[in-house]
Amino acid sequence: MQNPRLAGRYAKSLVVIAQEQNQLETAYADMKYLQDLCKQSKEFANVLRSPVIRDEIKEKVLTEVVSKNISPLTNSFLKLLVKKNREANLAEIAGAFVDQYNEIKDIHRVKLTTAAPASEEVKAAIIAKVKADAGLANVELVTEVKESIIGGFQLEYKGNLIDASIARDLRDIQKQFQKNIYVQNIR
């Protein structure tokens, strides 16, 4: 269930507590870990979302799976989520925390979508170009491989999309043929 307001509020509370205790970097690392864990392990995410599994069991699962890899502050936060029946929103809360951390640290997320994995040189060149053109100091590059774009790339940042993919070029050509502007010029 998507609930961005709830995720934002819980994330904000963790940000405030982490800042008060000078553990913002630690909490950020923990939230990135939990976000990745929820993405990679569908079973883990399904356990947290299940209305059939009791809260005590969910808390035990969380303790066994993640307690050794995260800080005591984040462990306490997870216990609070279970107590308030908000553990199903953990992935969304972790994402909201990362977004708020990026806003605090003035880090801008740039998403690069390619048809094949991009090399490190290409990634570095794109980061440098985005920093220079958009005037961004800190850039976090997120890459995605999507074969449906056929070739080229798509670049998203600050609400903008630069689509230099072959799939877009083919769609443009298809639109031109559908309009058939050349037949009108012959008449």
Image (spheres, rainbow, N blue to C red):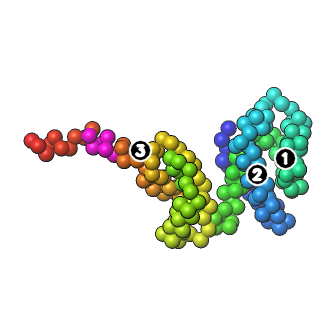
Give the crowd class for mark 1: few <14, some 14-19, many >=20 residues within 10 Å. some
The one of 29 and 48 positioned closer to us in this rendering: 29
| Circle 3 SS class | helix
Residue shown at 15% from the left, 42% from the top: 184
Residue at image mark 2:
33
Q: Which residues are magenta?
A: 172-177
Residue shown at 31% from the left, 42% from the top: 175
Q: Does residue 104 sit above or below 117 in this rendering?
A: below
Is residue 9 visible to us here? no
Q: Amino acid at mark 3?
A: Ala
- Compared across the picture, whether 172 is left or right of 60 comes to left
Residue at image mark 1:
66
Marks 1 and 2, Cα distance to the nearest angstrom?
9 Å
- Residue 50 percent location from the top left of the image: 77, 32
Residue 159 covered by magenta stretch: no
Quadrant containing the C terminus in the rendered view: top left
Q: Does residue 105 sit above or below 87 in this rendering?
A: below
| Circle 2 SS class | helix
Marks 3 and 1, Cα distance to the nearest angstrom?
41 Å
- Compared across the picture, whether 7 is left or right of 61 comes to left
Marks 3 and 2, Cα distance to the nearest angstrom?
34 Å
